[in-house]
Image (cartoon, helix red, strand yellow):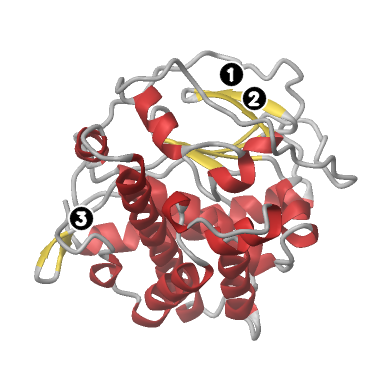
Amino acid sequence: MRLDGQRESQNVEDRRSDGSGGLGGGFRPAGMGGGRGIPLKGGSLVTIAVIVGIGWLVFGINPIQMLAMVTGGGGGGYTQDTSYQQAPSSKSAQTGAGVNDAGKIFVSKVLGSTEDVWTDIFKSAGATYQPTPLVLFSGMTRSACGQASAASGPFYCPLDKKVYIDLAFYDELKRRFGAPGDMAQAYVIAHEVGHHVQDLQGILPKFNQMRQNMSKADANALSVKVELQADCYAGIWANRTDQKGMVEAGDIDEALNAATQIGDDAIQKRTQGVVVPESFTHGTSAQRSAWFKRGYQTGDVAQCNTFQGQI
């Protein structure tokens, strides 16, 4: 990616030197709704907020359980399956807060590019985009959705409207999942910001209400649609950054490869040797790459409606 001319976002919160994993100044959980929707060509934007990004099969966090916790729909708190633990990384960022190391600069510029893209899209729809802060942490930290660790992977928490990421994850993305490259890393951030865009629509309470009357399989199927829309939104980000000359040859292939490598079917084959479709929560490799490609090729938010009238 060409990021030389991209501004750095001022919404990066660096907690990597915070050994306590605390929030420093405390926090207020954000409200779940009341956001202003983005009108679509031919209809309303159907969107849903979600907490996690890459997937509970990889990082042990079930989005349905977490949504139950944050919206009062049951469950006692942040649920994590310790069957997966992220391996320690020799490149795990341990620099102090406020240090502009290469990893932080990269994340800040990518986040800045998402802010520019979504500000323009919201403005064209007569709305105002409210950027999401991004929290860098190392090892462990707290979010309004519960305690986060390196094993949880990147995720978005709608209660504080923040994206969380331990930069050691990028080593895992390259080494364990076979998805190297700066565009693959940027795709992860764009996907999580996509969840923030969904959150700004205020549709999460409706999803939470619906899932309470669903079977686990049906709730998982709806979760897949949430994730695929975030992939499509990441594709829209890629489209707009490409128009600005920031995308280089091979970048889109890197992003598509990342989407493919973290499909539910690919992960299940890798981790358990058998594919169980009814347990999918994020979509197959083919679905994830296809929805990213749709967003990239069209650049049109209206093309990212994965729900087809279900909500």
Give me the C-alpha separation between circle 1 and circle 3: 33 Å
**Image height of 62 relative to 180, above or below:** above
x then y, percent, for residue 1: 65, 72
Disc 2: which residue: 141
- CB within 8 Å, label 3 to label 2: no
Amino acid type, callout 3: Val
- Residue type at mark 1? Leu
Instruction: Give me the C-alpha separation between circle 3 and circle 2.
Output: 32 Å
Which of the two marks, 3 or 2, is nearer to us in this view? 3
- Tell me which corner region of the image, top left, top right, bottom left or bottom right, holds residue 21: top right
Task: Quadrant for residue 42, please give it.
Answer: bottom left
- The mark found on residue 46 in the picture is 3
User: Spatial distance from mark 2 to mark 1, Cα to Cα?
Assistant: 7 Å
Q: Nearer the viewer, mark 1 or mark 3?
A: 3
Label 1 packing within 10 angstroms: few (<14), some (14-19), many (20+) = few
Left or right, 2 with reference to 44? right
- Residue 249: give x, y in percent of width and height: 64, 86
